[in-house]
Amino acid sequence: MRKAGRNVITLVMVLLLVLIAACAPTPEKVTPSPTPEPEPIPIAELGIIEIRVTDPPPPGVTSAVVHLTKIEAHRVVGAGYKWEPIFEDSVSFDLIEIFDKLKVLGWAEIEAGSFTQIRMEVTEVVVTIGGYSDPISATVPSDKLRIVRPFNVEGGVKTILTLDFDGDKSLILPGKDVVTGKERALFKPVVKLLIEKEKVED
């Protein structure tokens, strides 16, 4: 009888434990937060600047070779600006040979943006004039040639900048240097900047 009583008590305790376990709240399953994807870095749109040159010839001149280097564009950056190289190779062209023609000096792929002007270094101008047996090295008052005119470079578009020289006004024909007695010419560039756009094909 005593053993039966103990069995009943044990059974009651087991039932109570099962009941308590059934009533206990089930712990919520914690789902880990997903790792945030890194934001993509925006890719700058690229456009192309191409520099061309053309010119009407100055009278009496059979050759006028202009040597340039380091062509740069003046980029607008926020409230400021910076000079950005287009190309730094040395290039040359003959004002006579490009009459009624276009000569491509070079091109570069650069980030799209707004620009206010371009500049380049004139390293030398050599002139050959009818009636003179030897070429003449023309004096260049400033080694920097600046052409001020705003333009935009757009992504996927070729921006063509044509330097339209006025040869008749840019080149002053020679006279005698009062110091050396030698013939000399003067190169003071008068240039218009012409701007065209072409869609770049994929």
Image: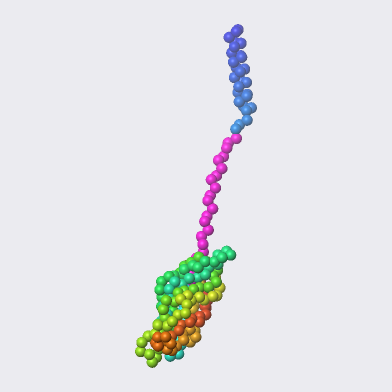
Task: Between residue 1 and residue 170, name the one nearer to us.
Answer: 170
Residue 15, position as x, y percentages in the image: 61, 20
Looking at the rendered image, the quarter that the N terminus falls into is top right
Residue sitting at the far front: 179
Q: Position of residue 12 (x, y in %)?
A: 62, 17
Give the residue at the far bottom of this rendering. 131
**Direction left: furthest residue:** 133
Vertical side of 40 occupied by 109: above or below: below
Quadrant in the picture for residue 5: top right
Residue 103 in sight from this viewpoint: yes
**Number of marks drawn:** 0
The answer to whether residue 46 is magenta is yes
Per the rendered image, the range of residues in magenta is: 28-49
Looking at the picture, how far across and down is residue 37, in whole percent?
Answer: 53, 49
Q: Residue at x 57, y 37 (%)?
A: 30
Name the residue at the right extreme: 23
- Residue at point 55% right, 68% down? 114
Q: Nearer the viewer, residue 79 or 38?
A: 79
Image height of 185 relative to 34, above or below:
below
Q: Is residue 165 visible?
A: no
